[in-house]
Amino acid sequence: MATPTATPNGELHAGIEKATVEIEHLSKWYGDVVAVADVSFGIGPGVTGLLGPNGAGKSSILKVLAGLLKPSAGEVRIMGRPVRSDIHLFRLIGMVPEQEMVYPYLTGREFVRLNASLQGVTDIDGATQRALVTADLGDAAERRIGGYSKGMRQRIKIAAALVHDPEILVLDEPLTGTDPVQRVQLIQLIQKLGAHGKTVFVSSHVLHEVERLADRIIVIVNGKLAAVGDFHAIRDKIDEHARTIRVKSTNDRDLASMLITTPHVTSVRIDPDPQSIVIEAEDVRAVYRLLPRIAREHDIRLFEVTSLDDSLASVFAYITQR
Amino acid sequence: MMLATFPTLWLTLRQFAAGRATRVVAFFAATPIIFSLVYLFNSGGSTANEFLGSIFNEFLAPTIVPLATLILATATLGNELSDRTIVYIALKPIARWRIVIEKFIGTFIVTGVAFIVGISITWALVAFGPEMPGGSTLPAMIVSSLFGVAAYGAVFLFFSLVIPRALLVGVIYILLWESLLARYIPGIRILSIRHFMQSIFVHWVNDSRVTIPQPTQLVSAIIVLVAVVIVSLILASLRLRRMNLD
């Protein structure tokens, strides 16, 4: 895992052959409130996740990257050019903003056509139809956006962002409001775009969403860069340092008494709701290896073994404690 | 066709077609019709030109034209800034001045059409009265109002980009400055858009009974209002280019 202490053009670009987006020493503050503090990283083709809790500064970074906000300090370059210097750079970017509001009086097709026209697309009708089909909104295209569900509004924004076939796609919490089926479809679409060489930058505060979307993640905590690197490498590190496990079995009491005598376990308590035991361990991997053996030897059936550290909060806690 | 060539203008017209603000503007533009109906029943001894002159100088120019224009001019970009839909037009490879111009034209078209219709009906009703108004009165009222709509539209559009509560500030400006101070204090009269609108009107009507104190020359009044429009639109474009669209 690369850490934020590395130099901007060195390790923070690790794993990228060619950075299409470069952020260097970016800071953004609103009056006395610092939203982003001296953040540097680069992203290239493929899907990169921007992970952070609510209020971490993700949206500010995306807005600066897209040219909506002027950085208070630092620079953002798209294909080597400062983002607010040249309006033609907007032709390379498609953005799905976080806010739900879309012109309610337009139909879905009109909204996507509007975006195609504003982007200077030559074949407006063809591009509009393709984008609507890609976002799976062909059937609802003639309906007014005001009558769309939250998930449909999310998808019409994605269709509008894709209509000009941009090289860089910036998606701010794109899965918000989508149902499970739409979520799977959108994840597949985002992965497909990344696989086709587009630079896709997706923000989320939900760990498992990012896990499914992106191989490379950038973690932001309190406006600062907490980690940059391969998602699985970061997860492996977290697993190594996991502390707490919940186990459901046929005989929690016996299992607890045997585990407490093992050297890796520091405490075991029986949790009545849900009926289970909660184990705190110094080396959780050793406990993972030990559990099946103890269960087999004492004829105890294990129903569920869950790491309680597998939450975004734990990820941030782990990363920020380092 | 318009969507492909002038997408922001198309969006603006759709925005106004769907919004309540346009109905309020139509109501404002129709208010002189009520006075013309009263005139039909009781002219009060005034000629048709005098009556229409009073409607324009005392009612349309100082209050109705600026208020109606204010509503749409502050909504055209102001609403998109407040609900953040500005993202959909700002993140596009089109110059900021083009966004401002198309928004301005949209405001001008909708407000202008409302006043053309309202003034035309007012004039037609007055023509049914004891005497026909002068032939130049109708074009004078329409053209002067359109100059006012353009000047106020550009100024208030700029206001909406620099002042968070532009509608409220605009109402205070109209009622305090245009309708009161600049109307009755001679020294600051020339610092009001209303004065130049009225100057165009009285020169065009060319009737000694329809006048205002110290009207500005016709060409000078037109130049001033055109300059107000140009300067306001330039400032609005610069502002939109530099502002954070959060």
Image: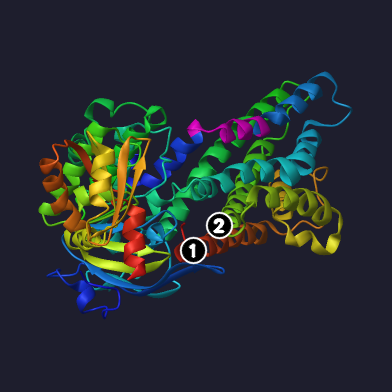
Find the magenta span and give its range.
Answer: B17-28
Q: Quadrant of the N terminus of chain A?
A: bottom left
User: Taking the image as drawn, is residue A236 in sight?
Assistant: yes
Please tell me which residue is depicted at 80% across the width and 33% down the height of the picture.
B51
Please tell me which residue is depicted at 65% across the width and 46% down the height of the picture.
B144
The quarter of the picture where residue A66 lies is bottom left
Relative depth, front residue between B39 and B204: B39
Q: Amino acid at mark 1?
A: Met
Label 2, secondary structure: give it.
Answer: helix
Q: Quadrant of the C terminus of chain A?
A: bottom left
Q: Earlier in the sequence, mark 2 or mark 1?
A: 2
Tell me the number on the disc at residue B161: 2
Q: Residue furthest right?
A: B45
Tell me the number on the disc at residue A203: none
Label 2, label 1: how far apart the Cα atoms are: 9 Å
Q: Which SS type dominates the magenta stretch?
A: helix
Tell me the subunit letter for badge 2: B
Residue B222 to residue B59: above or below: below
In the image, residue B26 lies in the stretch drawn in magenta = yes
The quarter of the picture where residue A124 lies is top left
User: Residue A105: x and y, percent?
Assistant: 43, 32
Horizontal arrangement in the rendering, residue A187 relative to residue A277 (left or right): left
Q: Which residue is mark 1?
A: B243
Tell me the subunit letter for badge 1: B
Label 1, secondary structure: give it.
Answer: loop
